[in-house]
C-alpha cells in the first residue's frame, strides 16, 4: 500500500511506522476514516510482529481499507503508472 499511495504523491517520506501515521493517512486519503487508519495499523502490526496471524475476517477488513486507498489514488495516476499498478504489480 505504501508504494501505491506513494506513486500518487501521498505520504512521501513516511514508512508507516511513524507514531502519527494513522492520522496522516486519514488526512491524505480522505476515504479512510481516522478509525479505519488506526485499525489498519493495528492489524498490520499484529500480523507483522504478533504471535500467529490475524483472522480471515481481519484480513478482509485490512484489504477493504487498502482498496479504499487504491481507489482514491488510482484515478489520478498517469497512464503508465496505472498500467504498472494494474498489470505489473497487480495491486488493484
Image: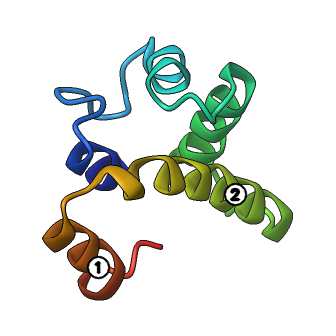
**Residue drawn 26% across the image and 28% down it:** 14
* Residue holding disc 1: 89
Image coordinates for residue 65, horizontal then vertical, percent = 65, 49
- CA gap between label 2 and label 1 equals 18 Å
Quick one: label 2 or label 1, which is nearer the N terminus? 2
The answer to whether 62 appears left or right of 10 in the picture is: right
**Any mark on residue 52, and which?**
none
Q: Considering depth in this image, is 51 or 75 the residue closer to the camera?
A: 75
Judged from the image, the secondary structure of the residue bearing numbered disc 1 is loop
**Residue drawn 26% across the image and 53% down it:** 3
Mark 1 Cα-neighbour bin, 10 Å: few <14, some 14–19, many ≥20? few
* Residue holding disc 2: 64
Judged from the image, the secondary structure of the residue bearing numbered disc 2 is helix
Image coordinates for residue 77, horizontal then vertical, percent = 26, 56
**Residue drawn 85% across the image and 64% down it:** 57
Image coordinates for residue 53, horizontal then vertical, percent = 68, 63
Mark 2 Cα-neighbour bin, 10 Å: few <14, some 14–19, many ≥20? some
**Residue drawn 20% across the image and 30% down it:** 12
Q: Considering depth in this image, is 44 or 1 the residue closer to the camera?
A: 1
Amino acid at each position: 500500500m505504501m508504494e501505491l499511495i506513494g506513486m500518487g504523491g501521498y505520504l512521501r517520506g513516511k514508512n508507516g511506522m511513524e507514531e502519527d501515521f494513522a492520522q496522516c493517512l486519514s488526512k491524505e486519503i480522505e476515504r479512510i476514516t481516522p478509525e479505519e487508519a488506526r485499525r489498519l495499523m493495528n492489524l498490520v502490526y499484529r500480523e507483522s510482529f504478533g504471535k500467529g496471524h490475524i483472522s480471515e475476517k481481519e484480513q478482509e477488513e485490512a484489504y477493504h481499507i487498502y482498496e479504499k486507498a487504491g481507489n482514491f489514488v488510482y484515478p489520478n495516476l498517469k497512464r503508465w503508472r496505472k498500467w504498472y499498478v494494474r498489470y505489473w504489480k497487480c495491486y488493484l
